[in-house]
Image: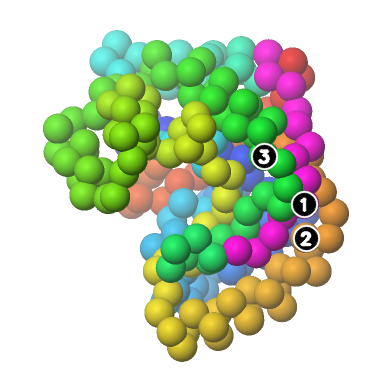
């Protein structure tokens, strides 16, 4: 039994290995690597793009219920090929994002959020209050109350977090390093053809529970 669960897109092959070493945590193998200070914040989540943000199971729901729903989801959702990834700053964070039209990705992520939400426990008042400290739009506040997370539906952005918040001159140095490390791996588009069910351990690190192809 895990603390929380989430649905991610995870990477394999060269970019997956590179990302795990960059962040300092291999989510698929539950194995740590040496981490830099600027990756300590995202490290425990692993190299991934969130599709459904981590959540607690609702009362009366079990991990077996979650696994069954996840299996059903992956059998009904079709793969998408959204385009190539690019290195981009999101606020003070550095991330990989989609270069091009993300309409199909937004649709896929919205389907996942809707279909799996019956398994999610409602947010506590404290959790809502913490989220409300951020500058949220009216739509994001509505998402927070309805779906447990503000950045869903039209506000969803596929991204792979590479750092915690950066400040100059560190920001320029880390951006240059990330460019050297990741750019050679981003020259072709990728197919989002699977999803990964993950769980949060007691120490806060997320690990892969199962990864299934999308066969809808």
Is the image coloured rainbow, by chain, by secondary structure, or in one colour? rainbow
Q: Is residue 193 visible?
A: no
* Residue span colored magenta: 76-88
Picture quadrant where residue 166 is located: bottom left
Judging from the image, what secondary structure is the residue with disc 1 in? strand
User: Which residue position holds label 3?
Assistant: 102
Q: Main secondary structure of the magenta part?
A: strand
Q: Quadrant of the N terminus?
A: top left
Given contact means CB atoms under 8 Å apart, are the residues at marks 2 and 1 in contact? Answer: yes
Give me the residue at 82% from left, 49% from top: 189
Q: Quadrant of the C terminus?
A: top right
How dense is the environment of label 1, judged by Cα within 10 Å: few (below 14), some, or many (20 and up)?
some
Residue 178 at what x, y percent from top left?
A: 63, 74
User: Which residue position holds label 1?
Assistant: 84
Q: Is residue 86 visible?
A: yes
Residue 9 at what x, y percent from top left?
A: 62, 40
> Which comes before the other along the chain, label 2 or label 3?
3
Give me the residue at 63% from left, 45% from top: 10
Residue 106 at what x, y percent from top left?
A: 60, 32
User: Which residue position holds label 2?
Assistant: 186
């Amino acid at each position: 039994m895990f603390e929380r669960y989430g649905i991610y897109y995870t990477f394999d092959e060269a970019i997956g290995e590179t990302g795990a070493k960059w962040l300092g945590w291999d989510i698929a193998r539950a194995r740590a690597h040496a981490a830099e200070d600027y990756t300590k914040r995202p490290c425990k989540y692993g190299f991934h793009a969130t599709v459904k943000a981590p959540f607690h199971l609702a009362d009366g729901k079990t991990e077996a219920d979650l696994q069954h729903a996840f299996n059903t989801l992956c059998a009904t959702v079709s793969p998408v090929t959204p385009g190539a990834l690019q290195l981009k700053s999101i606020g003070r964070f550095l991330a990989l994002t989609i270069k091009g039209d993300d309409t199909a990705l937004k649709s896929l992520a919205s389907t996942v959020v809707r279909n799996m939400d019956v398994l999610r426990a409602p947010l506590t008042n404290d959790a809502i209050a913490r989220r409300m400290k951020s500058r949220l739009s009216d739509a994001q506040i509505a998402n927070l109350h309805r779906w447990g997370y503000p950045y869903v539906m039209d506000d969803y952005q596929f991204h792979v977090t590479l750092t915690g918040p950066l400040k100059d001159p560190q920001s320029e140095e880390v951006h240059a390093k990330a460019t050297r490390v990741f750019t050679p791996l981003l020259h072709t588009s990728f197919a989002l053809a699977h999803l990964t069910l993950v769980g949060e351990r007691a120490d806060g690190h997320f690990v892969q529970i199962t990864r299934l192809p999308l066969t809808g």
